[in-house]
Image (cartoon, grey):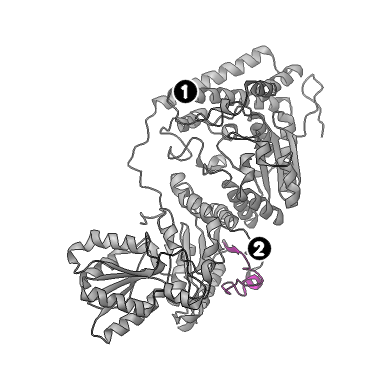
Amino acid sequence: MAIVTIIEAVNQALAEELRRDPNVFILGEDVGKRGGVFRATQGFIEEFGEQRIIDTPLAESSIAGIAMGAAMHGMRPIAEIQFADFIWPAMNQIVGEAARVRYGTDGKLGVPMVVRSPYGGQVRGGLFHSQSVEAYFVHTPGLKVVAPSTPYDVKGLLKAAVRDDDPVIFLEHKRTYRSVRGEVPDEDYTLPIGVADVKREGTDVTIVTYGLTVHYSLQAAETLAGEGASVEVVDLRTLRPLDMETVLASVKKTSRALIVHEDNLSFGVGAEVSARIMEGAFADLDAPVMRCTGPDVPAMPFAPTLEAVFMPTADKIAASLRTLLEY
Amino acid sequence: MAQASTSGGTLDFPQGLNGESLLDIYATMVLVRTLDERVWMLNRQGKAAIVASAQGHEAAQLGSVWALKDHTPDYFCFTYYRNLAVHLAQGLSPTEIMSGFLAKVGEPLSSARQFPLHGADLSRKIINLSNVVGTHVPHAVGWALAAKMRGEPTVVAAYFGDGATSQGDIHESMNFAAIHKLPVLFLVENNHYAISVPQSSQMAVANVADRAAAYGMPGVTVDGTDVLAVYEATAEAAKRAVAGDGPTLVEYDVERYLPHTSDDDDSTYRTKEQLEEGRKRDPLLKLQRLLTQEGLLTEERDAEYRAVAKREIDAATDASEAAPYPETDSFFEHVYANGSGS
């Protein structure tokens, strides 16, 4: 078991899949000689050549659309959208087109492509390098959406995404790229898409979260442990399909649920998880489901003071937990 | 280029085409027109929910398919909603097509989940995924990229109209295909209207093909009502693609005789005089005239083609009308490869 960062886990997963299957290829902006602006594809053009590591023009819609066309014809493309903030020109191809192929052909065609994209803030990225985009994709039947938080999960789920027969939006929180390290097995492994992971066990309250805020939630859980409260942290890892079995089992045990995400408060993952907890565990709840999330402003501002207001930090999560426990 | 004519006439056939194949094209065109008129009528009878007519586009669609058949080792078509003739020429039967217009069991592309002519029929080498104009062109380029990576000799034909050429996806696709010298034919059926918006409000250039130079590929405009001109230009483009010389933009100047779709009323934006002028270029009449002049088509044979077409379309209509609507038990199937995924 080696200790790696998340960006190293991404790089390893991609390289191993490229070696394993000749139909896998990568396309995106600066993925070739530059090795990706975050180095996700560093060393790839040297090992796999420019036929399989394609530097595209700066045109996100066709990156997704061309990947989709290749996926329909036996390839396993991995498209990199350089920043999730730049994915909007590709929305029509991903949401409008790719998600509907299997249904619209009555199962005759599928789109086994992965769209990888760094998302999220607290990197001084301002309005257009900090966005969380997951809510726009999880609403769409036909897509799978994965947003893991640890090197182990990232590597296992990214390899599973490449092998999946449907379009997978793979979101990598860029703040975690170099700040989060963890053990990764030396041998080939995958993790099932659609299965959450209990990152910390507890009995008094459940946090349901994913991405960077998994780590802040774990910090908050540690703080609350010092105050005598036992906090369970469920890392969704996959947002669609959503593993409600794990969430409901936890909520039925703790009777309290706090949903934490960096994405804006309204109409997002928190709303859906909350609704499903009501449907599946209403009688077990001792308090209303609460949310601690990014606020409803268009994006994370640039100045550090403003950025801090946006982020659901460990302190904010701890405060929400106290409110929920006192209810 | 010129081959000895099999007819008694003086026609110079483009290489690959002869009198017999021209008669085949004519017979198919008669069938397409008969089918097209019938589905329009079925719409007016309240039986077909939506129809986009190919009338006026037939020579462009059939001439190009024949050129692809004759001049590529293998090809694949990404079509759009007006490609009735392409679909028929690719082997879909009138009954299969008609069942799509009536949304009945037996529809082969999407099992009637989609509008007529939409979905995929891989054995007929057709994908027509979406109603969103121009979105399929990047897919055609991706398919060609995959074919090249896999060492297949496939040429990909991307069909679209003049309206689609305003979409960014089309520009991005042409640019990418030209950079990578992909075997793609960008086939524009320019009927000079995006629903109601005339070409002069869509672009400042005289021809869509003028844009090809900006991507570093050849662009050619031909009379899309003249099946010989269509065939020749498409064959040339196909040969370039097969030789590894990359994509070509071929623009067919065509007429759209009916409104955009059965839900449109074109009297609000074009005059009867304009339409009558366009009728002078009717591709079916043109080909009929040409074949007659060349001594290839007699009145008797023509009447026989039309009688056969009518019989076939009558039978297709009867079969489709008798067929049931799809059962609903598969409603939730094929959202994902496995499971529901919500």
Looking at the rendering, which quadrant does residue B229 occupy? Answer: top right
Position of residue A30 measured from the top left corner of the image (x, y, whole percent): 63, 68
Which is the main secondary structure of the residues drawn in magenta?
loop
The amino acid pointed to by label 1 is: Arg
SS of the residue under disc 1: helix
Instruction: Decide if residue B278 is on the left or right side of residue B266.
Output: right
Does residue B109 appear in this view?
Answer: yes
- Residue A35 falls within the magenta-colored stretch: yes
Q: Kindly identify the residue that appears in the image at 51 percent across and 36 percent down.
A: B117
Q: Amino acid at mark 2?
A: Gln
Question: Of circles 1 and 2, which is in front?
Answer: 1
Residue A51 circle label: 2
Residue B340 against residue A216 in the figure, above or below: above
What's drawn in magenta, residue-wise? Answer: A24-47
Chain ID, mark 2: A
Total count of labels: 2
Look at the image and tell me in which quarter the N terminus of chain A lies: bottom left
> On screen, A88 above or below A302?
above
Taking the spot 25% from the left edge, 80% from the top edge, the residue there is A230
Which residue is tagged 1?
B44
User: Is A219 displayed left or right of B62 in the figure?
Assistant: left
Q: Which mark is residue B288?
A: none
